[in-house]
Amino acid sequence: MFFWIQDGRILPTPPALAQNPRVASVPKADGPKRTNDSLTSGFQKTGSALFRRDPKKAYEESENTEVSVHFVHQIMASPAKTLPATQNINQCFEFMLENRIRHLPLTDPSGILKGFVSDRDLLLQKSKSMGNEEVSEIMKKQVLVASPTAEIRQVTKILLEERIGSLPIVNDEMKPIGILTRSDLLRLIVKFPNLNLFV
């Protein structure tokens, strides 16, 4: 499932989706991330993306067995790295550098998603100011998010159609529990040439 969030609330108009979405069991928000050992072997998590390796080497070392990946919770980076929307731009930028991430979900005091910024957003603002203003002044307040049971094929379609690089993954309380990026999808394809995305 995909939906837009603004001010912690679901907007009435969701993005267009493929028909007849499948349903999978949802991992608990506070519990350990569900993983598939065959998916994570040979990878190292760094922030919101899989460890960056040389694509040619990764392909040569890829597994030839067929691997099935259907839903977001199977490959999302979790837990989500977030900051309060009251942090200033410099603090957010340093946090992203330290954690080697390019996309940052921003939350209210109760942990509900309130906005989203990219490293480009922060760099652009830092070029105009000292970076001491709150990140809430420049964050995107309308954010497209997905549930952990969204199909990978639908995620790919949404990323292409909406021209975005990542999707925050939220639980039923609108709290970020993970993130999925285009880079994650590309690395998955490189790692597993015989990848099966059909449910």
Image: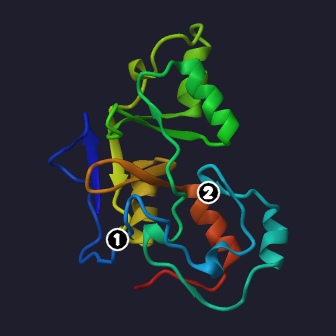
Where, quadrant-wise, is the N terminus in this rendering? bottom left
Q: Quadrant of residue 58?
A: bottom right
Name the amino acid type tagged 1.
Val
On the image, the x and y values in percent for residue 173 come to: 26, 50
Give the residue drawn at x 63%, y 54%. Answer: 49
Extreme left residue here? 12
Mark 1 burial class by Cα count in 10 Å: few <14, some 14-19, many 20+:
some
Relative vertical location of residue 45 with respect to residue 111 in this rendering, above or below: below
Between the C-alphas of marks 1 and 2, the distance is 23 Å
Give the residue drawn at x 51%, y 18%. Answer: 88
Extreme bottom residue here? 65
Relative vertical location of residue 99 with respect to residue 170 in this rendering, above or below: above
Relative vertical location of residue 95 with respect to residue 129 in this rendering, above or below: below
What is the number of the mark on residue 26? 1
Does residue 170 appear left or right of residue 42 in this picture?
left
Label 2: which secondary element: helix
Q: Nearer the viewer, residue 123 or 107?
A: 107
On the image, the x and y values in percent for residue 197 come to: 48, 80
Does residue 116 appear left or right of residue 68 in this picture?
left
Q: Quadrant of residue 120?
A: top right
Name the amino acid type tagged 2.
Ser
Count the numbered circles shown.
Answer: 2
On the image, the x and y values in percent for residue 182 come to: 55, 56
Give the residue drawn at x 78%, y 75%. Answer: 59
On the image, the x and y values in percent for residue 96 come to: 62, 35
Residue annotated with mark 2: 183
